[in-house]
């Protein structure tokens, strides 16, 4: 009876009185044959006897090497996932209550214990510990959800565009829809002189650290824009922020920074390793002809911007991260940028862009991929109606 089996519940009694330990063992043998009891006379020996298969510990609060809740605290540090039932002296209920408050699942008063109450208390402690573990998991999930909500607000803020003829909409979707955010970020700001500033970025990697860095870059971008820095100066300062805030020296970010002039006839683009936006106009759809440059955080020449004349009949500028076109297609290959451009051309974009339009594009990529996309997706559309 000293070796636990797969079916028996392994119970370790930590008790310096051999008579009390023997009585507890006899009670459990009388009540239920599914208990295997091992007795240790001191806390140090009891802790050494606890294994991953130990179902419960019966702990006396008066031991040669520990007294009171200090024994429980030490047990909690060394075997935090093992349920504990505390044994107290006759009439010392206050000590039992303190022990439960300190982390024990239950307590029993010596002299009042029966085979039935001892067996029931052990099984209750095991069940309660399981509930506590589930509650902790639910709490952690809730905290993670709240953290992701706050990060999502930072990655996808309220777009500050007020002109009635301009419509800006966005979409952000985490990779795999597992709730974990990555580092894609976006923003739009209309300045007092009527210029529209747009940004869409993608921090390399995926997870909470990348999301936090994306939030820092997005907030930094908005501050620099409101300070009226140009596209290249904005990205130069933003790159300094990235280098300071990144947790890994090889982390980088691709960024598309756009300024649309007040007359909506000209735009300035700075592409730091990012895909060029798509421009929708009466004649169809075409990628912006802007010179690609290195990502932020990667050594190389200074970032420069490209000035582009916009056709009189344009109505939507679509920016996106590479997650939307890196999924697979039915033949086993990847959709790719050219394939995504063709899909946008086939889908057709409304004169006034909408979130439903962006969701439809992502849904088509997911359908071709036969499931959620492996990377985060961010899209930002700016429409102009004359």
Image (cartoon, rainbow, N blue to C red):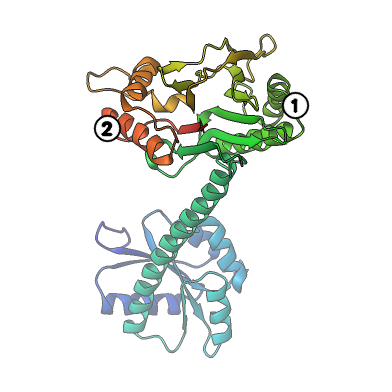
**Contact between labelled residues 1 and 2, with CB atoms less than 8 Å apart:** no
In the image as oriented, which residue stretches furthest toward the right?
227
Q: In which quadrant is the N terminus drawn? A: bottom left
The residues bearing labels 2 and 1 have C-alpha atoms spaced at a distance of: 41 Å
Closer to the eye: label 2 or 1: 1
218 or 61, which lies in front?
218
Occupied quadrant, residue 63: bottom right
- Which mark identifies residue 229? 1
Q: Position of residue 362 (x, y in %)?
A: 36, 33
Q: Position of residue 301 (x, y in %)?
A: 68, 9
Q: Is residue 253 visible?
A: no
Q: What residue appears at the point 44 percent right and 16 percent down from the top-left corner?
A: 286
Q: What residue appears at the point 57 percent right and 41 percent down from the top-left corner?
A: 164
- Which mark identifies residue 101? none
Q: Residues within 10 Å of mark 2 (few under 14, many from 20)?
A: some
Label 2: which residue?
A: 367
Judging from the image, what secondary structure is the residue with disc 1 in? loop
Q: Is residue 114 visible?
A: yes
Judging from the image, what secondary structure is the residue with disc 2 in? helix
Q: Vertically, is 253 above or below 111?
A: above
Occupied quadrant, residue 127: bottom left
Left or right placement of residue 221 versus residue 5 in this view: right
Left or right placement of residue 183 versus residue 52 in this view: right
């Amino acid at each position: 009876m000293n070796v636990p089996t797969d079916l028996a519940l392994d119970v370790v009694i930590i008790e310096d009185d051999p008579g009390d330990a023997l009585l507890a063992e006899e009670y459990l043998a009388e009540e239920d044959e599914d208990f295997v009891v091992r007795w240790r006379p001191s806390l140090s020996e009891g802790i050494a006897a606890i294994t991953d298969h130990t179902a419960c510990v019966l702990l006396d609060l008066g031991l040669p090497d520990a007294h009171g809740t200090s024994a429980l605290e030490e047990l909690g540090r060394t075997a935090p996932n093992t349920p504990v039932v505390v044994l107290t002296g006759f009439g010392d209920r206050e000590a039992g209550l303190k022990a439960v408050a300190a982390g024990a699942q239950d307590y029993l008063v010596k002299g009042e214990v029966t085979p039935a109450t001892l067996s029931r208390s052990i099984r209750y402690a095991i069940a309660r510990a399981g509930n506590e573990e589930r509650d902790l998991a639910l709490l952690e999930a809730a905290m993670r959800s709240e953290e992701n909500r706050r990060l999502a607000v930072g990655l996808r803020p309220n777009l500050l565009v007020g002109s009635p003829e301009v419509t800006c909409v966005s979409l952000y979707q985490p990779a795999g829809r597992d709730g974990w955010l990555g580092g894609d970020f976006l923003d739009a700001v209309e300045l007092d002189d009527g210029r529209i500033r747009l940004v869409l970025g993608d921090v390399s990697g995926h997870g909470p650290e990348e999301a936090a860095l994306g939030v820092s870059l997005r907030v930094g971008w908005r501050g620099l824009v409101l300070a009226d820095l140009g596209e290249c100066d904005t990205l130069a300062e933003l790159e300094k922020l990235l280098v300071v805030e990144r947790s890994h020296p090889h982390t980088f970010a691709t960024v598309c920074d756009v300024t649309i002039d007040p007359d909506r006839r000209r735009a300035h683009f700075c592409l730091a390793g990012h895909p060029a936006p798509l421009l929708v106009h009466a004649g169809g759809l075409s990628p912006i002809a802007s010179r690609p440059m290195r990502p932020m955080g990667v050594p190389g020449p200074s970032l420069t911007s490209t000035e582009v004349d916009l056709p009189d009949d344009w109505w939507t500028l679509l920016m996106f991260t590479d997650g939307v076109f890196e999924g697979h297609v039915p033949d086993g290959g990847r959709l790719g940028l050219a394939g995504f451009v063709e899909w946008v051309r086939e889908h057709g974009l409304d004169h006034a862009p909408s979130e439903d339009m962006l969701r439809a594009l992502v849904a088509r990529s997911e359908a071709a991929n036969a499931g959620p996309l492996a990377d985060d997706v961010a899209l930002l559309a700016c429409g102009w109606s004359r």
